[in-house]
Image (tube, helix red, strand yellow):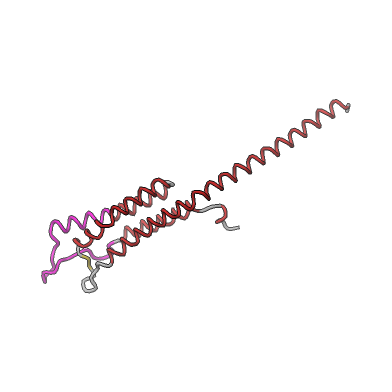
Amino acid sequence: MDSGLAAVLGAGITGAVASLGAFLAYWQTKAQVRSNAKLALREPRRKIYSDFLTACREANEAVWDLVSEETHEAPAGAIHRVLDTRFSRLQHLLAEVDLEGPDAVSEAAHAVVDAFGDLHANAFIMFETGEPSDDDGRPIGFGGDITGDVREGLTKFVWAGRKALQTDADQAP
């Protein structure tokens, strides 16, 4: 092999190794930037998800506080009033969740607010049409698992939120 060919092969190999090194450095930098961006999004999202979850749990608890120990029912008018006072805050927090995303978390949050909305509307309708009475003349209210749909939605919201907040550092080795 003559010296010219050896020089060309040497330059080619050196160039290939340098290109590979540059590609690996680029890939590592890109992964680091992506990881840093995820970490930067994590805390604001965590705060908004936490605020939404807390407001939903407080609204749920407020509804359950209305349940009579004697009848195990809650009056429709009281449910309507309690949810009426909390609905604008839930809507505000839902808008923040929508802005932060991702879509899976937003969809789960909408399911929760929709469940509260259905309960709110049903309580309003029952209240406006006159609550039915039992044989003793006592009003019949909402009984059973009043907020079952809300709790089911909250479970999905928590799982979606956890997944959205997860980073590579959260992965098990």
Residue drawn at x 81%, y 32% is: 10
Instruction: Find out whether residue 134 is within the magenta segment.
Output: yes
Rendering quarter of residue 122: bottom left
Residue drawn at x 13%, y 63% is: 132
Marks counted in the figure total 0
Q: Residue 62 at what x, y percent from top left?
A: 29, 64
Q: Residue 43 at what x, y percent from top left?
A: 48, 53
Q: Residue 79 at what x, y percent from top left?
A: 23, 61
Closer-to-camera residue (101/12): 101
Q: In the image, which residues are magenta?
A: 117-146
Instruction: Find out whether residue 25 is within the magenta segment.
Output: no
Rendering quarter of residue 27: top right
| Quadrant of the snapshot with the N terminus | top right
Q: Is residue 103 left or right of residue 85?
A: right
Residue drawn at x 17%, y 55% is: 125
Closer-to-camera residue (90/145): 90
Q: Residue furthest bottom?
A: 70
| Quadrant of the snapshot with the C terminus | bottom right
Q: Is residue 59 left or right of residue 26?
A: left
Q: Residue 114 at what x, y percent from top left?
A: 30, 52
Q: Is 165 located above or below residue 78 in the figure?
A: above
Q: Is residue 157 left or right of residue 91?
A: right
Q: Is 87 located above or below residue 140 in the figure?
A: above
